[in-house]
Image (spheres, rainbow, N blue to C red):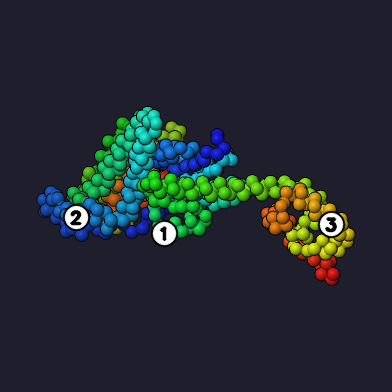
Amino acid sequence: MATHSDDSHAPQSPMPRRKRAIRRDGKHRRMPEESVGLLPQLTANRPWEFAALAHELKQPLTAILSNAQAARHLLDLDPPDLQEARTSLADIIADARRTTEVLRGLQAFVATGALDLTLLNINDVVRETIGLVHNNATAQGVMITLHLSDDFPLIYGDRIQLRQVLLNLVRNAFEAMHQVEDEGRALIVRTSSATPGIMTVEVEDHGMGVDEMTMARLFHPFFTTKSGGMGLGLALCRSIIAAHGGWIWATQNPDRGLTISFTLPAV
Amino acid sequence: MDETTPTVFVVDDDASVRCALARLIRSIGMQVETFASGREFLGCQVPDGPACLVLDLRLSGENGLVLQDALRTSERRLPIVFLTGHGTVPICVQALKAGAVDFLLKPVDEQDLLEAISRAIAVDRCTQDNRRKRAALAWRAKMLTPREREVMALVVTGLLNKQIADALGTCEKTIKVHRAHVMQKMQAMSVAELVRMADAVGIGDAYASQLQPLYAAG
């Protein structure tokens, strides 16, 4: 039975309110960036992500504060426990770095505010992305099948960011299929225009799949099932797709694995 | 592990937070054991000495409040200090109503944490003390003969020896002997103390209400 992630609601942000400025000769023009500061932009447009960010920062800060206060006690001992105090400081440094990484990841969200829109063929973007991972696919024994529709594949989109989305989805799919036996490693990418005016892209894997609880949090920022992962990949995808005026969601395949689908308004 | 040194159990799914809290608590002289999940913690053996639990509210994959519930029904109910990076009032109230000693926000200052831990340890010491006393009383009560238990049940309702004798269908002298044995075995210095003991081990009301009709006539 297929289940949906809980993000199959309206897009996170409305269609970009900026006017489309595509010159007649097909060349693009950069959209004016919003001149608002980071914090107001985050809290107003994405209060949920801000809360997740705040929580993510509280963890390393808690560790830093407690480690520092512990180090003080350790140095006050008679004799001082220098070894443990040093370990404490090393941990503080590690956590400060962790915090920096979290903030760096955050900047990716900020970057999605400015879209470089051009008229493009989504099928080309798919092919480019698959081209990038072709070697990996061969090495990992993944069979890639493309079902690319010829009906209205033209959309307005940011080529680089959409490629980023597809790359993310394809990489996740590869990871999901790590644990699966060789014959089962199949990745299918589809583009279609079942609904006029909307282009749908589907990335289907036959990997491990995920449980109910993970499904519900798949697109949450900072949610990850990978050790050492930061959990921003899918949240970033959602951010990019939303900025394009589309939606993204996940469905569990009847047999095994996940299908991540997203829509883009067609020309 | 030393019986009297308090042990603090820290349950948090974030490894560096776990480690830092443990280091801090250890640095002021308490024993610490850390766990990454409620499940892990429930599987461990809690020592007899005074102890408490420092628990992150939102453990990945399970809720801290769920663990609190599970602990409530376990034999060893450790006092809990909640720590959280979230801070909504309803959850805080819920946790406190369910018996948490305190509810602190992350990042937590050592003062607040150590104070809450002290309070929690004190609560546990008290609880353990009472438990031991009750166990000792129960042991003594086991030494009573069935007749002595009956006598004790009636003594603590305030009946005179003569009334007790009537209720049980025997003579006052016999009752006096039983009464003396009861006081001796239970190690009670006074009837007032005996009453408290009877309450603690549950000797009293049931018996009394059964036998009441028998003496009411007298």
Kindly identify the residue that appears in the image at 37 percent across and 35 percent down.
A76
Circle number at residue B126 = none
**Where A50 falls versus A174 (above or below)?**
below
Residue A10 image point, x, y percent: 33, 59
Q: Is residue B8 visible?
A: yes
**Residue denoted by label 1:** B89
Both labels 3 and 1 in a single chain:
yes
For disc 3, the chain is: B
Which callout, 2 or 3, points to the residue nearer the camera?
3
Residue B101 image point, x, y percent: 49, 52
Where, quadrant-wise, is the C terminus of chain B in this rendering? bottom right
Circle number at residue B175 = 3
The amino acid sitting under disc 1 is Val
**Residue denoted by label 2:** A36
The amino acid sitting under disc 3 is Ile
Horizontal placement of A251 versus B9: left or right?
left
Kindly identify the residue that appears in the image at 46 percent across and 37 percent down.
B29
